[in-house]
Amino acid sequence: MTTTTIGVLALQGAFQRHIQAVESLGANARAVRLPEDLDGVDALMLPGGESTAMSLLLGANAMTDPLRALIADGMPVFGTCAGMILLAEKVLDGRPDQVQLAQLPITVRRNGYGRQVASFEADLVVPALGLEDDEPFRAVFIRAPKVEAVGQGVEVLAEVDGDPVLVRSGPLFAAAFHPELTPDMRLHRAFLNSL
Amino acid sequence: MSNEGTNDRTTATMRVKRGLAEMLKGGVIMDVVNAEQAKIAEDAGAVAVMALERVPADIRADGGVARMSDPAMIEGIQEICSIPVMAKARIGHFAEAQILQALKVDYIDESEVLTPADETHHIDKFAFDVPFVCGATNLGEALRRISEGACMIRSKGEAGTGNVVEAVRHLRNITGDIRKITQADEAELFEWAKQLQAPLPLIQELAETGELPVPLFCAGGLATPADASLAMQLGADAVFVGSGIFKSEDPAPRARAIVEATTNYMNPDVLVKVSRNLGTPMTGIGMDEIDVRMADRGW
């Protein structure tokens, strides 16, 4: 069996942390910036960062259509924070030119928790993901998107105060927080195990 | 245990404060002096804007005392921008920082570009929930700022000159000494701490990890896409561009080109494409032509 190759979108943001996380779990990680970087990629990670800047750079680097095609074809994707916004079907408080890469049936509000002073950490329990023990997952939220509605077929895997913060629909995973900022690798491992 | 009920939220942890800097990596933070410029910056793909009254080139030209911006001007920019808004406080001026925190700016820059308010003490940055970025010309200065609670370091360069030479010097000072420290033995680390006037535990951590505990950005004199690429190749995690954009002939395309160059900094073909036909960059000044060295402010 060949080792899985995870393409980490590296246009801007915390992509290096995702690359380190993926490599620490024994998979190959590849920074993807241009369409040719996508050859041979088995799954994708969309990191946190500024979704407006990423939207512009997706267009500038001709990445929007190739990514949309791969995702429509069923490629597994894990999007965190800005990555969640890129996957969402509906974005509130976004920019009109904001790029949308998938049809994950959720409605998210950009910066829905407020400005940086409201950024926070919280313990999550994620039973459905089969995390190997009961230890809560310490989640870091930075100017995070708020999931305001979930559509059919979306499984809510974790919540904060009643709002979904980790969701899955088929091969698409999305987190409003940053599992790459903590040493806890359980969510990355769960994504890799799902492949 | 279930997820029902209330999750305890903890705000303003070091992870949360440094976390925003992580999200800005690979991006361009642009100086803006009004809402109109902030809009241009966001449209061009800036990851954040720095709200200030005058760009450094004008501060340099006008002279006088440079202070924190008018809250109304910062609010105007917050109103129009959906990306993070940073603002500058004078070195040591914790009251200005308190005002900026009350305005809920996303990052405070304790900046040498403004006239220092305290010639001995920097702001106690642990006392704030809003994270701070501070400038540094060398590794010792960077570690002293981190020991005061800074969550992001930027090389100072020489703001408002359009001349990248000082930014390169400072970036190389910092990354060069980091490389040397990773080669040092235990005994030599004590000497490094003494020489750099920096806390020993931070030096020891550096020797172990090979990098600063917070992101290292580059600022001060960047004016072209090539300048951004140079800074990134020298080890910067992201770049600040101040006067370089709005003191150029045609700010919007230049801003966008610098954004694309920062992402594709290792790809000369992209750099060729984005560098074409940008109009005249800011004129810039040589280091022997300036009276005030802003980078010398800070201790």
Image (spheres, rainbow, N blue to C red):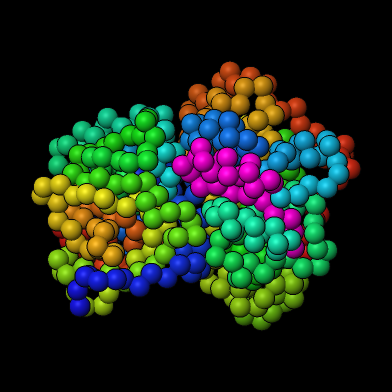
Residue at the front extreme? Answer: B72
Q: Quadrant of residue B107?
A: bottom right
Image quadrant holding the N terminus of chain B, namely bottom left
Whether the magenta-drawn stretch holds residue B274 is answered as: no
**Residue B268 seen anywhere in this rendered image of the structure:** no
Residue at (83% x, 35% y) in the render: B61
Asked whether B53 or B281 is in front, the reply is B53
The magenta segment: B69-92
Q: Position of residue A175 (x, y in %)?
A: 28, 56
Establish if B32 lies above or below B71: above
**Residue A188 seen anywhere in this rendered image of the structure:** yes
Residue at (56% x, 20% y) in the render: B276
Q: Position of residue B75 (x, y in %)?
A: 58, 44
Residue at (83% x, 47% y) in the render: B65
Establish if B204 lies above or below B299: below
Whether the magenta-drawn stretch holds residue B71 is answered as: yes
Asked whether A191 or A135 is in front, the reply is A135
Q: Is residue A151 left or right of residue B127?
A: left
Asked whether B154 or A107 is in front, the reply is A107
Q: Position of residue B97 (x, y in %)?
A: 66, 59
